[in-house]
């Protein structure tokens, strides 16, 4: 294996909305940027986002930035960082304007942008593109701008570890090429924009790239993660039978435009569950569907969009997925089920993307700024990626960084790793919606029994090690939080405990590379 070595001012790992926004701003500021991606530049999570970007542009009667803040806090179940919410929501209009200047085309109605509504929103404030293809349009615009700017993209490379000097400061990134060749990128700043960890579960809306690599890398570099137990399940993916991997999303905007959830007997069941019924926050809807499926012994629920006018034109992506599966949403209800969708937690950062490790930054789904709390408000994720993707470059410029010396190319250290299928089976069975102490402990034991210590030699090895670490971290946090809150539903602790558990759980790794929930994390919790 021959080592390779290169240098940059900023290494961006990942090519979603946060990563490419940062890369473009950094290049515009004169920094030498390299974007590292496992697949092509277009293969991240961003392209799969359907609903849109939640943003208050001042032209919707009755809506306001304060209302957007209030909805975000209400969805977040008491664990949002209110200052972070205010910062991100208020920076949204400017960030969306700059995205449009970069070429993103949003759907318009006359002279103003069209809006839709999703769960938990008190107003029609979600801008969208291509009907239900918002992520694809955002990605198209950012990829085109990245190519125009001549930014170096190193695709076919997986990030392995942050390189650090004797003080612990990050001085670069160790990576593996697809052919297994190890190398280093020397840089005073490394930005993780790697997305989430939906691949912990057998059924997910996430692409194969979402294996938690960024959170794992940051933890191994000494960073702290938080809110990892809050894995958001999207209430509605298309149910086509048991399957492993990415499932087609049925955007919440379908309910925003009037579709109704029904059980197998045709009964609309959300009305008695929450005042906003089918447009309750996502955690409420996903849990209600799961309960109803169990009560009726059904593998799925049904989303009835047959009364919607112009469905095929408004939701072309959903329509195409349904037709491919032999379902006609114009005449029959769409079979749907919840699936793992979004990591509300991640690497702890401020709203400038700074982790606690000098030189290491994180933005987008990989990060936990405190915007989402225990449950992300729909369409706040592209918003966060845009806002923090811009701000992190200002942080990198302000922080400066030492001139970086040549770093040796060393083999990756050995880390705990279990087979992906074991991890996905255990997490899907015991750490999805509806968890309890014995299931969580059993899942942890099953993964532990399958774990060996090995140095990753290729992308699969890096991903499986990340999934193993993330699984044990999610299980540890979920076992410690003995209450139900937001996306974390415990069947043995169904109530919310605001007296003792109204705080985020923080996680680090110990010397053996195992995740540890910090003992002071929850006041009064065992
Ligand atoms: C959706 O379109 O329902 C997903 C949007 C999101 O996850 O924010």
Image: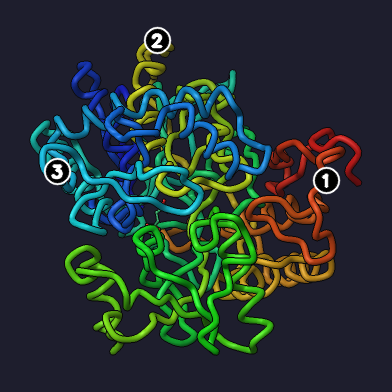
At x 46% / y 80%, what residue is drawn?
Answer: 302
Q: Which corner quadrant of the image does residue 284 belong to?
A: bottom right
Q: Position of residue 491 (x, y in %)?
A: 79, 66
Mark 3 or 2: in front is 3
- Which mark, by number, is residue 497? 1
Mark 2, residue position = 398
Q: Position of residue 401 (x, y in %)?
A: 41, 13
Residue 382: % across, % down: 36, 42
Crowding at dot 1, Cα within 10 Å, few <14 / some 14-19 / many 20+, comes out as: some
Depth check, front residue: 525 or 68: 68
Whether tag 3 and tag 2 are in contact, CB under 8 A, the answer is no
| Residues packed near mark 3 inside 10 Å, few (<14), some (14 to 19) or many (20 plus) | some
Q: Nearer the viewer, residue 121 or 452?
A: 121
On screen, residue 229 versus residue 317, left or right, reads right
- Residue 250 placement: quadrant: bottom left
User: Does the residue at mark 3 contact the one at mark 1 (Cβ under 8 Å)?
Assistant: no
Mark 3 or mark 2: name the one nearer the start of the chain.
3
Residue ID for mark 3: 105
Point out residue 308 in the picture as x, y percentages from the top left corner. 29, 70
- N-term-proximal mark, 2 vs 1: 2
Cα separation between marks 3 and 2: 32 Å
Quarter containing ligand 1?
Answer: bottom left
Seen in the picture, residue 261 relative to 88 is either above or below; the reply is below
The Cα atoms of the two marked residues, 2 and 1, are separated by 41 Å
**2 vs 1, front mark:** 1
Element under disc 1: loop
| Residue at 11% over, 37% down | 111
């Amino acid at each position: 294996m021959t080592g390779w070595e290169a240098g940059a001012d900023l290494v961006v790992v990942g090519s979603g909305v946060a990563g490419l926004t940062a890369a473009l701003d950094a290049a515009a500021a004169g920094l030498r940027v390299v974007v590292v991606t496992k697949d092509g530049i277009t293969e991240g999570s961003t392209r799969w986002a359907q609903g849109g970007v939640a943003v208050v542009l001042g032209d919707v009667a009755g809506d306001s930035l304060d209302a957007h803040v209030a909805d975000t806090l209400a969805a977040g179940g008491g664990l949002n960082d209110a200052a972070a919410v205010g910062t991100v929501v208020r920076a949204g209009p400017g960030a969306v304007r700059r995205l449009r200047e970069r070429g993103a085309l949003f759907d318009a109605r006359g002279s103003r942008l069209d809006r839709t509504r999703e769960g938990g929103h008190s107003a029609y404030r979600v801008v969208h593109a291509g009907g239900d293809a918002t992520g694809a349009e955002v990605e198209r615009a950012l990829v085109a701008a990245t190519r125009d700017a001549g930014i170096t993209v190193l695709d076919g490379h997986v990030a392995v570890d942050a390189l650090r000097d004797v003080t612990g400061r990050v001085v670069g990134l160790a990576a593996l090429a697809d052919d297994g060749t190890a190398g280093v990128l020397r840089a005073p700043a490394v930005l993780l924009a790697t997305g989430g960890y939906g691949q912990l579960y057998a059924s997910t809306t996430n692409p194969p790239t979402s294996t938690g690599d960024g959170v794992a890398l940051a933890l191994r570099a000494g960073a702290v993660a938080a809110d990892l137990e809050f894995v958001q399940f999207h209430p509605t993916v298309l149910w086509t039978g048991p399957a492993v991997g990415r499932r087609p999303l049925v955007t919440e905007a379908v309910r925003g435009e009037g579709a109704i959830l029904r059980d197998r007997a045709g009964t609309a069941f959300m009305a008695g569950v929450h005042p906003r019924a089918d447009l309750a926050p996502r955690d409420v809807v996903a849990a209600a569907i799961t309960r109803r499926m169990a009560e009726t012994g059904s593998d799925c629920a049904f989303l009835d969009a047959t009364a919607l006018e112009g469905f095929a034109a408004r939701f072309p992506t959903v329509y195409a997925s349904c037709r491919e599966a032999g379902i006609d949403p114009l005449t029959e209800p769409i079979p749907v089920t919840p699936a793992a969708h979004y990591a509300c937690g991640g690497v702890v950062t401020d709203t400038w993307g700074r982790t606690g490790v000098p030189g290491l930054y994180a933005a987008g789904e990989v990060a936990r700024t405190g915007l989402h709390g225990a449950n992300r408000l729909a369409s706040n994720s592209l918003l966060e990626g845009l806002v923090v993707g811009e701000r992190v470059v200002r942080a990198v410029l302000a922080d400066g960084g030492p001139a970086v010396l040549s770093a040796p190319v060393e083999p990756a250290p050995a880390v705990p790793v279990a087979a992906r299928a074991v991890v996905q089976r255990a997490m899907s069975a015991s750490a999805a919606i509806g968890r309890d102490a014995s299931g969580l402990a059993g899942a942890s034991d099953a993964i532990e029994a399958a774990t060996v210590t090995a140095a990753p030699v290729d992308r699969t090895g890096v991903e499986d090690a990340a999934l193993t670490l993330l699984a044990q971290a999610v299980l540890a946090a979920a076992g410690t939080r003995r209450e139900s809150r937001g996306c974390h539903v415990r069947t043995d602790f169904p109530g919310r405990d605001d007296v003792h558990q109204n705080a985020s759980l923080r996680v680090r790794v110990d010397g053996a590379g195992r995740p540890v929930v910090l003992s002071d994390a929850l006041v009064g919790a065992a």
